C-alpha cells in the first residue's frame, strides 16, 4: 500500500468516509441475505481506499464475516498471474490447512489449486490449457461458495489496476457467476491510472452491466475533514493557517495530508518519497510534453489555452499535440473556458520545482508581460494578483513591488483581506531594494504598515496585526501626527481584546487624549472606548461617550461611525434589559451598513440581533438570521472575525432549544476556522453548557481549565464573568458538591454591582437559587444569606422578554409557571428542569401525586434530549417517592411515535437493527436511536424486556 511504501504515520481518526462505509455495510447486509454482490471502489492514489476497506473489513469481521485479503502488485501485469487470489488462498491455508480446504472441493480438485500454491501438491497436467484454466475458475468459485455456506465471506482485492490478465478474467468470472451466496467482493483501483488504453477499462465497463455489481467513487476530503484528520494526527486542533496551507497543498488527499504533516507547518518541502511518486507519471511522458508542462507549471495549477500558447510561442495545433499525452496520462485535465488544470496541486508544484533558475525567471517574466498586455488572458478579477505573482517570480524587484501594491488594493476592494496581507508583506520586504519606492506607489512605508494592520484586523490575524501596528508606531511621532497614532492605538487595543490580553482600556484613553478636538479621528476613538466601557460595567460613562460620538458623526456625515455608535447604544439598551429597543437600534445600524457597503457594520448588527432574538424567545428567527450572516461573512471576507462570532451566537440558539448535536457541529466548525481568542472562549463556553447538560464531566473540566474558570482567572467583561461563574457553579453541582457551588456564588455576589445583561444575570440567579436549595439542608444559615444577597441583586434587574421572565420565575420559586414559560419558548431542557423543581417542591409538601404528574412530564423530555444527569435526578426522585414514571395501566398510542411503534413491532419479532433498517428504508444508526428511545420510554434495559412490556401494555395492538 502507498502508506507502507512511504513509511508514513496514519491518523488515528477515521475521517469523512461515513457515506462510503455505509454503502459497503449495506452491500454486506445484502450479501448476508444470500445475494452475492461486488463493489468496485475507485479513487485516485492516496485518497484513502485502503483505509476505508480496512475499516470496513474490521466491522465485517466483528459481525462474523470471514474476511479474505488479496492485493495486486505493480509487477502483476508483467507476469505475476493470479497474484491477489494466490494471496487470499495462502491466507486460507494458514487459517484452515490444505486438508480442510480440499474437503470443501470435489475429489482431486485441489490439484487445480496447486497452480496457485505448491502446498496443494502436483498441478494437473492440463493446467496451461483453456480447459485447465476454466476448471481453476470453477474450483475457486466452488471454494468461495462452500466457505460462504457456514458464514458470510468478504473478499477484498486491492489495486486491480495492476491486475494481470488472468486475475482480471477471474474477477469478471466470479462477478458474473456468484449469485446466491453470502459473499461480497470489494475491488479497489486507482481511477487516475486508467488511461484510455488501460486493460482494466473494458473489464470495468463489462462489470458495470452485471447485476449485483456496484461502482463507488471515493472523493477527496473536504476542508473540514482535512482539519479533523490533522487534529487526529496532532492530538489537538491545529491552527487555522496551518489547516489552510495543508488543505491547499494536499487538496484533500489523505496520504498527502499525512506527508505534509511531516513539515513543521505544512508549507515545507514535500518528502522525497512522495515527490518521486508524484513525478513518476510526468517522467514517462515525451520530452516535448514535459517541456510544455514546465511552462504550464509556471502559470499555476490552472492556465488558459490562449495564455499558454502566448507564453510558449506554440501555435494552437502544436500546443494541443504536445499536451495530448499529458491529458491521456491524466497529468493534465481539460477545464471550462479552454483551460488546462493539473490533476493535483502537488504535481504542478513538483514540476515547477524542477525548473532551472534562469528558466524560472524567464517564464514568470513572460507570463507577467503577456497578462499585462492582455488582461483578458486570465479570469476576470485575477489579472492584478497574477501579474504581481509573476513579476515576483521573475525577480524583478521594482515591478514586483508596484504590482503587489496594486493587487493588495484590489484585494481590499473585494474584501479579500487574507489575500492582501502577503501582498503587503511583499511590498515591505522589497521596499529597501527599490529606490524611490514611495514615489512608485504614492504612499510612505508607514502607510503600508497601517494598511497591513488593517487587513490583519479584518481577517482576525491578530499576531500579525500587532506586529504591523508596533512597527508603524515606531516610525511615528504622536506630537507631529497625533491622529495617525490615535488610530493605531485603537487598532492595537482591539487586537489585544481579540487576544484576551489586558491593556486595551489604557490604549483607548490615550488615543482619546491625542484627539481632543471634534473631528473624524475623535469620533472613531469614541466608538471603541464607549463600547469597552459598557462591556466592563461602566454603563453611564460609556453611554455618555457614545452619545457624544453619535452627535459628532452625524454632524460630520460619518455614516460607518454613526452605525457603530448606534450599536454601542444598543449594547447599553441590552445591558439595561431593553431588548426590543436593542433589536430596533441594530436594524438601523444594519441598514446604514448596507447603504455604505460596510461588511463590518452589517455583520456586527446581524450578530447582535441573533443574540437579541434569542433573548426575546424568537430562537427560530435567530437561527435563520445567523445562517444568513454566515453566508454574508464569506462574501465580505470576514469569516474568521465576524463569521465565527455569528456562528457562536447560532450555537447558543441551538443549545437553548436542545438541538445539541447541531450546536456541537457548529462549534467544531467555528473552532476549525481559527477564531480570535475571545470568540474561541465564547464558543467553548457554549460547548461547556452542552457538556454540563449531558454529563460529559471530563470534557467540561478540560474546557473550564482552558478558560481559567477553575482557577478563577480575572476577566474584563461582565458577561464573561457572569457566564464563567455560572459554569463553575454548574460544574460543582454536577460533581455533587453544593457546598463548593455555594462558595462560588458567595464570591460572585460579593463583587461590586456592575452592569451585565439582564438575561445572563437572571440565568445565573436561577442557578444560585438551585444551589441555595441544594445546600440548605447542610448549611441553612449560609444558604439563606446567599439567597438574600441574590434577592437584593434581583431587585435591581429589569425583566423584559419571555426568557428573562422564565428565569425570574425559577429564581422566585414559581416552578410551575416557569415550566409553562419554557414550554412556550420550546426549550425542553429548561422545561424539564422546572418540572423537576416543581415536583421536588410538591414532594416536600407531601403532594406525591402532583409530584408524579410533573416527573412523568419531565422524564420523556430529558430522555429525548438526552440529558443523562437530569434523567438520573428525575429517576432518583421518582424512586424515593415510589412512583412509576411510565403508567403501565393506561396504555396510549402516544407513548411512542408511529415510527417507534413500527420499530418496536420488528424488535418483538426478533429482527436485528440492520434487518429493521432494510425493511423500513432507514439507516441502521437511525434504528439504533429509535431503539434507545423506546427502551427509555418503556423504562427497560433490554430488547427482550421491551418486547414483554409492549405485550403487557398492549402497544402492539394499537
Image (spheres, grey):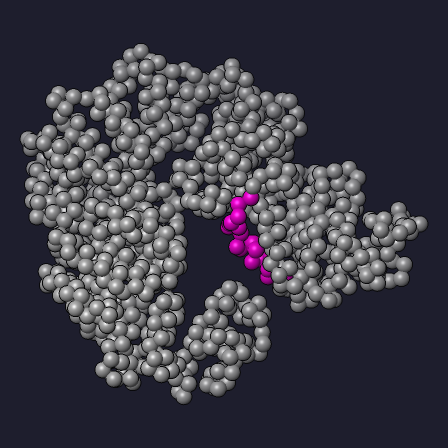
Report if residue 797 is visible in the image. Answer: yes
- Residue 15 in magenta? yes
- Residue 411 in magenta? no
Taking depth in this image into account, of 923 and 196 the one nearest to the observer is 923
Report the side of 884 relative to 838 (left or right). right
Residue 928: x and y in percent read: 50, 67
Indicate the quadrant containing the N terminus: top left, top right, bottom left or bottom right: top right
In this rendering, the answer to whether 440 lies above or below 822 is above
Taking depth in this image into account, of 732 and 886 the one nearest to the observer is 732
* Residue at the image point whose x is 48% and y is 46% from the top: 232
* Residue at the image point whose x is 69% and y is 50% from the top: 157
Q: Residue furthest bottom?
A: 889
In which quadrant of the rendered view does residue 98 lie? bottom right
In this rendering, the answer to whether 727 lies above or below 316 is below
Residue 499: x and y in percent read: 28, 40
Q: Residue furthest top?
A: 435
Report the side of 896 relative to 850 (left or right). right
| Numbered-mark total | 0
Q: Which residues are magenta?
A: 10-28
Report if residue 633 is visible in the image. Answer: no
Report the side of 116 relative to 543 (left or right). right
Residue 842: x and y in percent read: 24, 80
* Residue at the image point whose x is 81% and y is 54% from the top: 137
* Residue at the image point whose x is 16% and y is 30% from the top: 486
Taking depth in this image into account, of 387 and 500 the one nearest to the observer is 500
Residue 905: x and y in percent read: 52, 78
Amino acid at each position: 500500500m502507498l502508506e507502507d511504501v512511504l513509511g508514513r504515520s496514519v491518523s488515528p481518526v477515521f475521517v469523512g468516509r461515513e457515506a462510503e462505509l455505509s454503502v459497503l455495510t449495506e452491500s454486506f447486509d445484502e450479501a448476508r441475505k444470500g445475494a452475492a454482490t461486488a463493489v468496485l471502489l475507485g479513487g485516485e492514489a492516496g485518497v484513502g481506499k485502503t483505509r476505508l476497506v480496512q475499516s470496513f473489513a474490521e466491522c465485517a469481521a466483528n459481525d462474523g464475516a470471514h474476511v479474505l485479503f488479496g492485493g495486486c502488485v505493480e509487477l502483476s501485469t508483467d507476469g505475476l498471474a493470479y497474484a491477489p487470489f494466490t494471496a487470499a488462498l495462502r491466507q486460507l491455508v494458514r487459517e484452515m490447512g490444505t486438508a480442510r480446504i480440499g474437503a470443501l472441493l470435489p475429489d482431486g480438485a485441489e490439484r487445480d489449486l496447486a497452480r496457485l500454491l505448491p502446498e496443494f501438491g502436483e498441478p494437473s497436467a492440463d493446467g496451461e490449457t483453456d480447459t485447465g484454466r476454466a476448471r481453476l475458475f470453477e474450483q475457486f468459485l466452488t471454494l468461495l461458495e462452500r466457505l460462504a455456506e457456514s458464514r458470510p465471506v468478504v473478499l477484498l482485492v486491492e489495486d486491480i489496476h495492476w491486475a494481470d490478465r488472468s486475475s482480471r478474467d477471474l474477477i469478471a468470472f466470479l462477478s458474473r457467476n456468484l449469485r446466491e451466496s453470502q459473499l461480497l467482493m470489494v475491488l479497489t483501483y486507482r481511477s487516475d491510472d486508467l488511461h484510455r488504453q488501460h486493460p482494466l477499462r473494458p473489464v470495468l465497463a463489462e462489470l458495470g452491466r452485471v447485476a449485483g455489481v456496484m461502482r463507488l467513487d471515493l472523493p477527496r476530503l473536504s476542508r473540514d475533514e482535512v482539519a479533523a484528520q490533522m487534529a487526529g494526527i496532532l492530538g489537538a486542533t491545529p491552527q487555522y493557517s496551518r489547516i489552510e496551507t495543508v488543505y491547499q497543498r494536499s487538496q484533500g488527499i489523505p496520504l498527502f495530508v499525512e506527508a505534509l504533516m511531516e513539515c513543521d507547518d505544512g508549507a515545507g518541502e514535500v518528502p522525497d518519497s512522495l515527490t518521486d511518486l508524484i513525478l513518476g507519471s510526468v517522467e514517462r511522458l515525451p520530452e516535448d510534453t514535459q517541456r510544455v508542462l514546465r511552462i504550464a507549471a509556471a502559470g499555476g495549477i490552472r492556465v488558459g489555452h490562449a495564455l499558454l500558447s502566448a507564453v510558449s510561442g506554440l501555435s494552437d495545433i502544436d500546443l494541443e499535440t504536445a499536451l495530448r499525452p499529458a491529458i491521456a496520462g491524466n497529468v493534465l485535465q481539460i477545464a471550462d473556458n479552454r483551460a488546462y488544470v493539473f490533476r493535483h496541486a502537488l504535481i504542478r508544484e513538483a514540476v515547477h520545482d524542477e525548473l532551472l533558475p534562469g528558466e524560472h525567471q524567464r517564464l514568470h517574466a513572460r507570463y507577467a508581460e503577456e497578462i499585462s498586455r492582455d488582461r483578458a488572458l486570465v479570469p476576470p478579477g485575477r489579472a492584478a494578483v497574477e501579474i504581481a505573482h509573476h513579476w515576483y517570480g521573475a525577480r524583478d524587484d521594482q515591478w514586483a513591488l508596484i504590482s503587489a501594491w496594486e493587487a493588495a488594493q484590489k484585494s481590499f476592494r473585494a474584501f479579500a483581506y487574507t489575500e492582501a496581507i502577503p501582498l503587503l508583506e511583499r511590498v515591505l520586504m522589497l521596499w529597501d531594494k527599490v529606490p524611490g519606492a514611495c514615489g512608485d506607489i504614492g504612499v510612505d512605508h508607514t502607510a503600508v504598515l497601517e494598511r497591513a494592520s488593517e487587513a490583519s484586523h479584518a481577517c482576525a490575524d491578530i499576531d500579525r496585526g500587532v506586529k504591523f501596528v508596533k512597527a508603524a508606531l515606531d516610525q511615528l511621532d504622536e506630537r507631529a501626527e497625533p491622529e495617525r497614532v490615535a488610530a493605531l492605538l485603537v487598532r492595537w487595543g482591539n487586537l489585544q481584546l481579540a487576544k484576551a490580553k489586558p491593556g486595551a482600556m489604557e490604549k483607548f484613553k490615550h488615543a482619546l487624549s491625542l484627539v481632543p478636538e471634534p473631528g473624524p479621528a475623535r469620533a472613531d476613538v469614541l466608538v471603541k472606548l464607549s463600547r469597552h466601557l459598557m462591556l466592563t460595567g461602566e454603563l453611564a460613562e460609556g453611554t455618555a461617550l457614545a452619545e457624544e460620538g453619535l452627535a459628532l458623526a452625524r454632524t460630520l456625515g460619518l455614516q460607518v461611525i454613526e452605525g457603530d455608535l448606534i450599536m454601542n447604544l444598543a449594547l447599553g439598551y441590552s445591558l439595561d434589559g431593553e431588548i426590543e429597543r436593542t433589536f430596533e437600534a441594530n436594524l438601523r445600524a444594519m441598514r446604514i451598513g448596507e447603504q455604505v457597503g460596510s461588511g463590518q457594520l452589517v455583520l456586527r448588527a446581524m450578530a447582535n440581533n441573533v443574540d437579541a432574538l434569542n433573548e426575546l424567545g424568537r430562537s427560530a428567527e435567530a437561527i435563520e438570521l445567523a445562517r444568513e450572516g454566515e453566508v454574508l461573512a464569506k462574501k465580505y471576507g470576514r469569516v474568521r472575525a465576524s463569521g465565527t462570532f455569528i456562528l457562536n451566537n447560532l450555537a447558543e440558539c441551538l443549545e437553548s432549544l436542545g438541538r445539541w448535536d447541531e450546536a456541537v457541529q457548529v462549534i467544531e466548525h467555528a473552532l476549525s476556522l481559527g477564531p480570535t481568542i475571545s470568540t474561541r472562549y465564547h464558543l467553548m463556553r457554549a460547548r461547556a453548557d452542552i457538556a454540563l447538560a449531558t454529563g460529559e464531566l471530563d470534557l467540561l473540566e478540560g474546557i473550564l481549565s482552558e478558560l481559567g474558570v477553575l482557577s478563577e482567572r480575572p476577566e474584563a467583561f461582565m458577561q464573561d464573568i457572569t457566564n464563567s461563574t455560572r459554569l463553575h457553579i454548574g460544574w460543582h453541582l454536577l460533581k455533587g458538591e453544593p457546598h463548593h457551588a455555594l462558595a462560588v456564588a458567595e464570591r460572585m455576589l460579593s463583587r461590586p454591582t456592575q452592569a451585565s445583561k439582564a438575561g445572563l444575570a437572571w440565568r445565573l440567579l436561577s442557578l444560585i437559587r438551585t444551589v441555595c436549595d441544594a445546600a440548605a439542608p447542610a448549611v441553612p444559615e449560609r444558604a439563606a444569606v446567599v439567597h438574600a444577597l441574590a434577592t437584593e441583586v434581583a431587585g435591581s434587574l429589569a425583566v423584559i422578554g419571555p426568557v428573562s421572565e422564565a428565569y425570574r420565575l425559577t429564581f422566585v420559586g414559581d416552578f410551575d409557571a416557569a415550566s409553562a414559560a419554557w414550554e412556550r419558548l420550546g426549550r425542553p431542557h429548561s422545561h424539564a428542569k422546572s418540572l423537576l423543581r416543581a415536583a421536588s417542591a410538591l414532594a416536600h409538601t407531601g403532594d406525591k401525586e402532583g409530584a408524579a404528574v410533573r416527573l412523568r412530564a419531565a422524564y420523556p423530555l430529558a430522555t429525548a434530549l438526552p440529558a443523562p444527569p437530569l434523567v438520573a435526578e428525575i429517576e432518583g426522585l421518582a424512586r424515593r417517592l415510589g412512583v412509576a414514571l411510565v403508567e403501565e395501566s393506561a396504555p396510549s398510542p402516544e407513548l411512542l411515535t408511529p415510527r417507534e411503534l413500527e420499530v418496536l413491532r420488528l424488535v418483538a419479532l426478533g429482527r436485528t437493527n440492520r434487518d429493521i433498517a432494510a425493511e423500513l428504508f432507514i439507516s441502521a444508526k437511525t434504528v439504533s436511536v429509535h431503539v434507545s428511545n423506546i427502551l427509555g420510554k418503556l423504562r427497560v434495559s433490554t430488547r427482550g424486556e421491551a418486547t414483554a412490556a409492549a405485550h403487557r401494555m398492549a402497544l402492539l395492538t394499537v
